[in-house]
Image: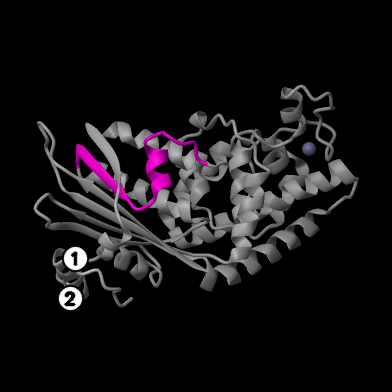
């Protein structure tokens, strides 16, 4: 299944402006329907009210960038929001149960304990290829934040390791539920085998099915291209791709010192979310909140609808991203890019070669 989407972000000069320009973005998206169904079922089972404001942006961005199944990403988001039914979590919701860990019978069963602190979790982490030893009083949020160091050292290795870690978290939670709800004991090596198998299957699957891409073109108000960027990105859903493209563009606009921004998108939902006129589904609730917060970085920012036919250049940039490993900024001198810009200026909206 292939779906495409287009966003345009334009910046314009306003009163007393220091910088102005035109911003166009686009994401291309491919995903097996199986993965989407899993994401939908995870969303359907999710609760709606979330204290997402307390989660640092770095953590939240990292959770969204993890390469894993949509259901596991949704699970991690719920975990970060303290929205899983741990013993302590249930007690906070006035459920009259014993909040002590069913595995070790010693400590209170918090999300941090289930996934990191319990002796069982520790044996799983240490036995894994990550050979990770959680600290004495581990915090999931601090742990996710600590991944930034890994990513600065070796992005590809860190990405693989974090993907594995996400599967381990998922099966630690599954193991906890098997024991707590059914009395079935999974050993640490069983958890590891299941996580490893699921990770390998997922890795094989995404090689040719789940790869997506974002395309961004940034122009000044005369139409001159300042930045043409292709960003390979694993995407969990179409709307997620839309919002990630907008977020990347806003961050780039901030870096470039743009003060006044007009965002044009062909996705009406994305515009309504940005204008805070419609509540997003749970799946992208945090992402929307994250992007909405970026709006305060501009002197003025507005959003409007534009047709897909008007977005050939960023469409092509997003498609280029599908075959790339890393974020790529294209020089203006590349011929296909020049021809593309010329065709857009002349109003040509024919499909372009990939
Ligand atoms: Zn325990």
Q: Nearer the viewer, mark 1 or mark 2?
A: 1
Q: Nearer the viewer, residue 37 or 207?
A: 37
* Magenta stretch in the rendered image: 257-280
* Image quadrant, ligand 1: top right
**Residue at 43% of width from left, 45% of height from top?**
269
- SS for dot 1: helix
Task: Give the quarter of the figure containing the C terminus.
Answer: bottom left
Q: On the image, numbered disc 1 is attached to which residue?
A: 344
- SS for dot 2: helix
> Residue 270 colored magenta?
yes
**Residue at 55% of width from left, 45% of height from top?**
283
**Residue 160's spot in the image, x, y percent?**
54, 61
Q: Nearer the viewer, residue 5 or 349?
A: 349
**Residue 253's spot in the image, x, y percent?**
25, 45
**Residue at 83% of width from left, 54% of height from top?**
187
Residue 130 visible, this orientation: no
Name the quadrant containing residue 77. Answer: top right
> Residue 240 colored magenta?
no
Alpha carbon of mark 1 to alpha carbon of mark 2: how far?
14 Å
Q: Nearer the viewer, residue 25 or 132?
A: 25
Callout count: 2
Residue 31 visible, this orientation: yes
- Rate crowding at label 1 as few (under 14), some (14 to 19) or many (20 or more) other CA atoms within 10 Å: some
In the image, is residue 123 above or below residue 310?
A: above
Q: Is residue 270 left or right of residue 306?
A: right
**Residue at 53% of width from left, 53% of height from top?**
66
Name the quadrant containing residue 254. Answer: top left
**Residue 257's spot in the image, x, y percent?**
19, 41
* Label annotation for residue 335: 2
- Badge 1 vs badge 2, beta-carbon distance below 8 Å: no
**Residue 124's spot in the image, x, y percent?**
73, 52
């Amino acid at each position: 299944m292939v779906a495409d989407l287009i966003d345009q972000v334009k910046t314009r000069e306003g009163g007393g402006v220091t910088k102005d320009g035109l911003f166009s973005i686009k994401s291309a998206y491919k995903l097996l329907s199986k993965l989407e169904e899993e994401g939908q079922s995870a969303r359907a089972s999710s609760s709606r009210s979330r204290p997402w404001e307390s989660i640092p942006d770095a953590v939240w961005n990292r959770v969204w960038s993890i390469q894993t199944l949509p259901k596991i990403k949704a699970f991690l988001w719920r975990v970060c929001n303290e929205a899983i039914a741990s013993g302590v979590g249930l007690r906070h919701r006035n459920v009259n149960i014993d909040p002590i860990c069913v595995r070790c019978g010693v400590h209170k069963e918090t999300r941090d304990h289930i996934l990191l602190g319990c002796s069982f979790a520790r044996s799983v982490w240490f036995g894994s290829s990550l050979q990770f030893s959680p600290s004495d009083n581990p915090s999931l949020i601090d742990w996710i934040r600590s991944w930034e160091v890994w990513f600065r050292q070796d992005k590809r290795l860190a990405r693989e390791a974090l993907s594995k870690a996400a599967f381990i978290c998922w099966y630690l939670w599954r193991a906890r539920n098997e024991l707590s709800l059914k009395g079935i004991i999974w050993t640490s090596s069983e958890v590891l085998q299941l996580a490893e198998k699921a990770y390998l299957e997922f890795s094989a699957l995404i090689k040719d099915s789940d790869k997506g891409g974002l395309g961004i073109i940034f122009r000044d108000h005369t139409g001159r291209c300042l930045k043409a960027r292709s960003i390979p990105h694993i995407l969990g859903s179409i709307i997620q791709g839309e919002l990630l493209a907008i977020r990347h563009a806003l961050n780039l606009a901030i870096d470039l010192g743009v003060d006044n921004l007009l965002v044009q998108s062909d996705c009406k939902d994305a515009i309504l979310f940005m204008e805070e006129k419609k509540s997003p589904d749970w799946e992208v609730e945090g992402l929307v909140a994250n992007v909405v917060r970026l709006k305060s970085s501009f002197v003025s920012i507005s959003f409007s609808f534009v047709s897909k036919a008007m977005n050939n250049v960023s469409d092509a940039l997003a498609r280029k991203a599908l075959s790339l490993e890393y974020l790529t900024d294209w020089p203006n001198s590349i011929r296909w890019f020049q021809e593309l810009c010329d065709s857009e200026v002349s109003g040509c909206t024919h499909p372009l070669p990939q």
